Image (tube, grey):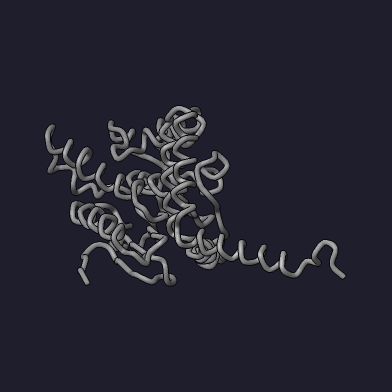
Amino acid sequence: MKEYKTILYQLGVPQEGACTITMNRPDQRNAINREMANELLDAFTRVRGEEGVKVVILTGAGKSFCAGGDLTVLPGFDHYTIFEWLGRTGYGIIRAITENEKVVVAKIKGHCIAGGLELALACDLIYASEKTKFGVTEITMGILPGWGGTVRLAKSLPIFRGKEILLSGRKDYTAREIYEMGLLTRVFPEEEFESKVNEMVAGLCQVPADSLRMGKAVMNLSFEGIPWDAAMAIERSAIAWLFHSEHVQTLRKAALDALEAMKKAAPQEGGK
């Protein structure tokens, strides 16, 4: 098993069929340095090959999800290396999450700020505890979110709400405010947070892996704004492919057997 220094990679947590990836720099509120970025990219690439995993949970150790990029990284950038950090490392992580065959769940508590929110926006489902604080602060430093936050806020929210989050630079939006704006999947009370998220994960782990993968892929393509007819054609093709899966064929055989049994049990026309 490969060892990481800034993240935890746990198969079978919280249950079989799941893998939990935990950002593990709690003393820095899980701020993303170069080492963590490289390990996140490696972990999300690696988990794609875990055959028994259906759901990946991304979370943070300690009291926060992620406070964004580690400011100690900034002095090392120049006009050229900043493009590598954004266009190669950051973009690679975001793609490894969004294009992952597994369902990726963001499990958020504490602080979800700047780059932390960008990671969450790349996930399929976002669950937060009610005491979580959200925001993107890059604009107060004279820059913009660079791992897709500017774009995903525009795609995920009514544009006027996305603009407020981006342009205000606030880092104190409550989970309830962000939820009411339309961004989060659900917000749970602090004392119920762990059990409620685990319950949602357990439900996902009961769904056939192939249909989870196809459902995610079709919705992602629709989210990207492809033409309606093309999206519908992709949906039909996905269903046709899934129809030949072992799970569906087992259900189909059971249904056919039940119909045959009903025919045999029904009284024959003209019989006594």
Q: Nearer the viewer, residue 71 or 14?
A: 14
Q: Position of residue 140 (x, y in %)?
A: 33, 34
**Quarter in which the N terminus is drawn:** bottom left
Which residue is rendered at x = 47% and y = 37% of the image? Answer: 156
Q: Nearest the camera: 272 or 8?
A: 272
Q: Position of residue 74 (x, y in %)?
A: 18, 43
Depicted 179 relative to depicted 245: above or below: above
**Which of the 4 image quadrants contains residue 25?**
bottom left
Drawn side of residue 60 relative to residue 202, left or right? left
Q: Quadrant of residue 137?
A: top left
| Residue 68 visible (yes or no) | yes
Rendered location of residue 179, percent (x, y): 54, 45
Q: Say which residue appears at 29% left-offset and 49% top-offset.
A: 96
Query: Percent from the top left, x then y, of residue 224?
Result: 41, 34
Residue 55, compared with residue 221, is above or below; it is below
> Which residue sits at x=39%, y=60%?
56
Q: Quadrant of the C terminus?
A: bottom right
Does residue 108 appear in this view?
no
Residue displayed at 65% across by 66% down: 258
